[in-house]
Amino acid sequence: MKASTRSVLPRVIPAALLVTLALAGPWLIPHAVDKPVTMPFGEPGHGAPLGGDQLGRDVLSRLLAGGRELVLSALLIAVVVTAVAAVVGTIGALRPVVGRVVERAADMLILLPAVLGVMLVALSWPGGGRLAVIVAAVALGLPYAVRLTAGAAAPVAASGYVEAAAAGGERLWFLVVREVLPNLRATLLALLGLRFVEAVYVVSMAGFLQVGPQPPAADWALMIRENSSGILLNPWAVIAPSAAVGLLALSVNLAAAALAPQTGRKAATLL
């Protein structure tokens, strides 16, 4: 095994295990997530290793079931933001007029606080819910991502082979897809990891504020909010989902940093 592989694996394996566990969690639950198995805020034991929540539901079961939607939502947000930012940022680098418009729009959107942006979109969205949070997270993540990709694409767009292709009559879409984006793989991989971590926090924040998933859904952020009043009775009802969110974000961040080539890591620090 190469030395580089040995140094990367310890930082990638924890993230892979946590993501896999979160995705498979709903099939591993020992109890139904909506059925009481203990007294409210019951202590660990009697078939409930982490005790019960405010309604006596099994904390472990709700913990296992509450991560899949968060991971899938964060992954969708990260992929959409990275893909759109890659295209828009590259077009902005190739077309200076478009780039100036994109930069001004990004400057305005960056000024919008994340909490306010999520609440504005989620509360005005018909029916609210997780889809509204995903749309809000995409809108909030795009300004930073576009500016990052535009900055990374600018020197590539100014290189001789891209200018030669443009002078030869190649269309804009060809320049974006064939000439510039292949040279931004490292930056885009680092950006994808950063956007995933940011999306975890945004979706979790929305769940805590109850502008996304609603009770009685099994959701890590909702678990923290719902059980905060009984933290002295059964701390695991709050500590377990809090640790799950933190460990997921930390492990994915470390994995993305380990997988991204050095050039991508340097570019990501501009975000």
Image (spheres, helix red, strand yellow):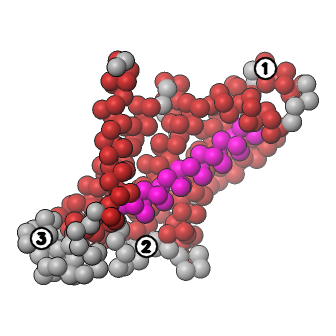
**In this rendering, which labeled residue sits more in front, label 1 or label 3?**
3
In the drawing, what numbered circle is on residue 47? 3
User: As shown in the figure, which amino acid type bears the numbered disc 1?
Assistant: Tyr
Cα–Cα gap, marks 2 and 3: 27 Å
Residue for badge 1: 161
Nearer the N terminus, badge 2 or badge 3?
3
Nearer the N terminus, badge 1 or badge 3?
3
**1 and 2 marks in contact (CB < 8 Å):** no
**In this rendering, which labeled residue sits more in front, label 2 or label 3?**
3
In the drawing, what numbered circle is on residue 213? 2
Tell me which corner region of the image, top left, top right, bottom left or bottom right, holds residue 49: bottom left
In the drawing, what numbered circle is on residue 178? none
Question: Up-down: is 94 above or below 6?
Answer: below
| Rendered location of residue 84, percent (x, y) | 66, 48
Report the predominant secondary structure element of the magenta stretch. Answer: helix
Q: Residue at x 54, y 55 (%)?
A: 77
| Rendered location of residue 187, percent (x, y) | 56, 33
